[in-house]
Amino acid sequence: MAQTVETNIKRQPLISDAVYKFGTIAIIISVTIFFAIMNDSFLTYKNISDILRSVSIVTLLAIGVTFSLIVDGFDLSVGSTASLATVSAAASLVLYRQELFIALLIPILCGLLVGLLNAFLVIRIKLPDLLATLSVMYIINGIQLTFTKGSSLYEGMPGATGHFIPSFLFIGQGSVLGVPVPVIIMLAAVILAHIFLEKTTYGRLFYMTGGNREAARLAGIPTNRYRLYAYIISGLFAAIGGIVLTSRIGTGQVSAGAPLLMDAVAAAYIGYAMFGAKKPNVVGTFLGSILIGIMLNGLTMMNVPYFAQDIIKGTILIAALAFSFTKRKQ
């Protein structure tokens, strides 16, 4: 009897660890099966392609958030940065009739500048990450609204003589061997970021900076430099996400990236629990994006109103935060 009780006690931590490590994957599979049963069109190639296209943009923003979390920071400006990239890319093409290189360069430079501004406020001015990036978010929103006068940028609009060139639209709407280009960009970003963070010395220095900044500093690691890099990388990925978004919808929609912020943050925090990592990680972030994308697509196919979907997203974020921080304290 005593041996049976002891065996059960030993099994409980094993079961708990298994749920912690693979719970998100199990949820993804379960949710997929549920929506497939509810709607015959859910597992069609077209719908899966649509899910992956939308997930690709969220994943790019979420990778940026993940880098900021790794250094024990937080970037709330990624959604607004994506919006700024969207507007600047569209303006380059529609208003100023530029070619592909400029239409890509300007948004990326905008993203890098936002990252530098965030880093300056957090590292030099020593503002809390949350407040600094929240302030920058409002500033960016004001800049893009002032520039566009609150209107979206599209072909044929008053004063517009340019158009969205095919090479730019290919980024968000094209495919290679049947695989959408945004998915290829997303997978390349996930693989490269994962290899960089997990397999290189520089990646480990990012984690050391976030794990214990003072100890890392005393060990000779330039912690402020790596925090600077993290915010620049976050701005870069947000800008790339904005470019893909612009190319996909074919317009420069004002504040188009704002709704992506919560999805990106939720995906990054879901990544904490993936495979028992107990730390921000890119693969977990990617799977978190997949989960959110599947749920939102399935709810849309079930005709759940978009405003009700925000309730679901908020609940997912609460659950991810509660689960992640509870396990971190244990």
Image (cartoon, rainbow, N blue to C red):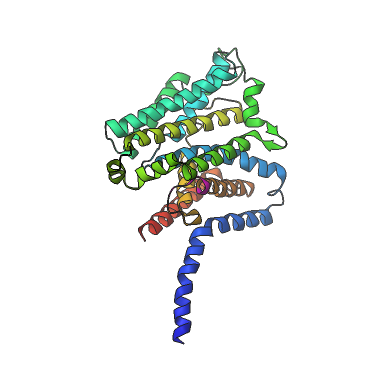
Picture residue at 45% right of the left edge, 33% below the top: 233
Residue 255 seen in render: no
User: Where residue 35 appears, x then y in whole percent?
Assistant: 64, 54
Residue 312 seen in render: yes
Give the left or right position of residue 321, taking residue 30 as reference.
Answer: left
Decide: is 277 above or below 119: below
Decide: is 194 above or below 322: above
Q: Nearer the viewer, residue 240 or 4?
A: 4
Decide whether residue 261 is among the magenta residues.
no
Give the left or right position of residue 26, taking residue 267 as reference.
Answer: right
Q: Quadrant of the C terminus?
A: bottom left
Give the left or right position of residue 76, taking residue 33 as reference.
Answer: left
Picture residue at 39% right of the left edge, 32% below the top: 137
Decide: is 6 above or below 277: below
Picture residue at 59% right of the left edge, 16% below the top: 99
> In the orientation shown, which residue stands out farthest toward the bottom?
1
User: Where residue 73 appears, x then y in whole percent?
Assistant: 36, 41
For the record, the magenta segment spans 279-284
Give the left or right position of residue 255, taking residue 131 as reference.
Answer: right
User: Where residue 169 appears, x then y in whole percent?
Assistant: 64, 26
Question: How many labels were placed on the picture?
Answer: 0
User: Where residue 253 appears, x then y in whole percent?
Assistant: 53, 27
Q: Quadrant of residue 38?
A: bottom right
